[in-house]
Image (cartoon, grey):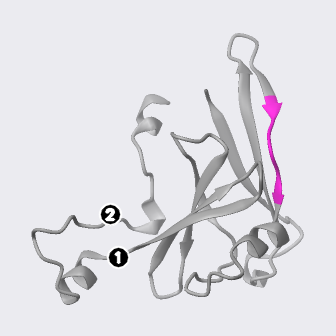
Amino acid sequence: MIKLVCIEVDASRRRSDFTISSRFTIRSWTLADINQGRWHKGDDMEAAEFWYLYSDQLSLPWVNKPEYPLVSLVDPDAICYLLEENHGTNWIIEVEMRNKAFKSSARYMKEEEEEEEGCSAKRVRRNVFDGDSFIPSEISSYLS
């Protein structure tokens, strides 16, 4: 299965105008027939619906828009998004698009922060990445 997820931002707004109330739409498509190049429209989610899903999750940041949509390998209706706070703290949240439900969240830390918090060598290290170059898999290497 090949699924495409895009975050479309209202083109009438300038980049500097983005706020928590920024308008965007998350759209998805699934490749139905690779030989004919036929795609089926998937589920859409407007910005207001997205923000409502995790409005009771007080620890999560409010950002202009989610970034780097990633389809779950376990549940193709579940999409993970990156939320990046101003000071570089990154969160991954998982949203079930079909039922429009918040599933989970995880905070990602820089290695320096982990060392400051005293993570021992016995513990499994958290994933570390720079949000600007976040590509969570090597699938893109097969596209060239």
Which quadrant is the N terminus positioned in? top right
Camera-side residue of 106 and 111: 106
* CB under 8 Å between discs 1 and 2: no
Q: Is residue 35 above or below residue 122?
A: above
Residue farthest to the right?
A: 12
Residue farthest to the left?
A: 121
Q: Which segment is the magenta one?
A: 40-45
Decide if residue 58 is on the left or right side of residue 55: left
Residue 3 x, y percent position in the rendering: 65, 36
Q: Can I make out residue 144 in this image?
A: no
Dot 1 lies on which element?
A: loop
Crowd around label 2: few <14 · some 14–19 · many ≥20 (10 Å) = few
Q: Is residue 16 above or below residue 11?
A: below
Q: Amino acid at mark 1?
A: Met
Residue 82 x, y percent position in the rendering: 55, 65
Residue underneath mark 1: 109
**Quadrant of the rendered structure where residue 60 is?**
bottom right
Dot 2 lies on which element?
A: loop
Distance in Å between CA atoms under marks 1 and 2: 8 Å
Residue 108 x, y percent position in the rendering: 39, 72
Residue 101 x, y percent position in the rendering: 72, 61
Q: Amino acid at mark 2?
A: Asn
Decide if residue 78 is on the left or right side of residue 113: right
Q: Residue at x 74, y 21 (%)?
A: 32
Q: Residue at x 81, y 30 (%)?
A: 40
